[in-house]
Image (spheres, rainbow, N blue to C red):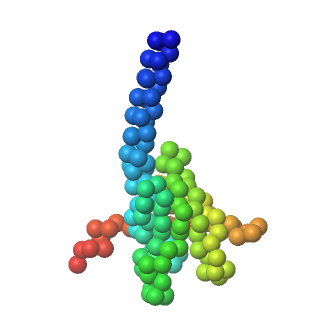
Amino acid sequence: MRILKVKIYFLGILAAALWLTAPIVMATDIHLLTGIWKHSDKDVWMEIEFDQAVGTGRVFRNDKKPDSIGKPVLTELIFDAALGEGEGLMYVPQMQSRYGAKVKLVGPNLMTMKVKVGFMSNTVKWLKVDVSALTEP
């Protein structure tokens, strides 16, 4: 009986330690996507930020539609750094709705995003922007 109590006590301590370190692991994982990303074919830039473990991508710059700056385009982003993949909802302006998006980190500065609308899908490349280049005169 005493051994059972010791095992339960040990498992409780182990569970508490894992629970306390989980946010630290998630915080280090999300930095891979956090930052400013530029659409490879258009002058549209998106800034991805995380609140806890859920990310949001907002328009950072859009040369053709400056009034869209700050609007969320990628929402409910969950990213698994171990797999280098994530999922979220991407706003499709042509449909004026959000659709499932699969995000894949191909390299440290290259992300692909596959958005599926019905039976059609489109994959877009996003390039990470060096923030220091934005602030220099």
Q: Residue furthest left?
A: 137
Residue at (48%, 22%) from the top-left corner? 8
Frontmost residue, 28 versus 106: 28
Foreground pick, 62 / 75: 75
**Point 59% across, 74% down: residue:** 91
Compare residues 59 and 132 and report the one nearer the observer.
Answer: 59
Q: Is residue 33 visible?
A: yes
Q: Image check: 81 left or right of 89? A: left
In the displayed orientation, state which residue is furthest to the right.
119
- Measuring from the top left, give residue 14's x and y in whole percent: 43, 29
Q: Nearer the viewer, residue 105 or 28?
A: 28
Q: Residue placed farthest to the front in the image?
A: 1
Number of marks in the rendered image: 0
Q: Relative to 104, is 21 on the left or the right?
A: left
Examine the rendered structure and indicate whether residue 67 appears above or below residue 131: below
Q: In the image, what residue occupies the spot 49% across and 59% down?
A: 54
Which quadrant of the figure has residue 13?
top left
- The x, y position of residue 112, in whole percent, is 55, 62
Indicate the quadrant containing the C terminus: top left, top right, bottom left or bottom right.
bottom left
Q: Position of residue 130 (x, y in %)?
A: 34, 66
Q: Quadrant of residue 87?
A: bottom right
Give the vertical position of 62 relative to 56 (above or below). below
Where 39 falls versus 49 (above or below)? Answer: below
Is residue 134 found left or right of 80 in the rendered image? left
Residue 73 x, y percent position in the rendering: 53, 73
Asked if one can make out residue 40 in the rendered structure from this viewpoint, the answer is: no
At x 64%, y 76%, the residue is 97
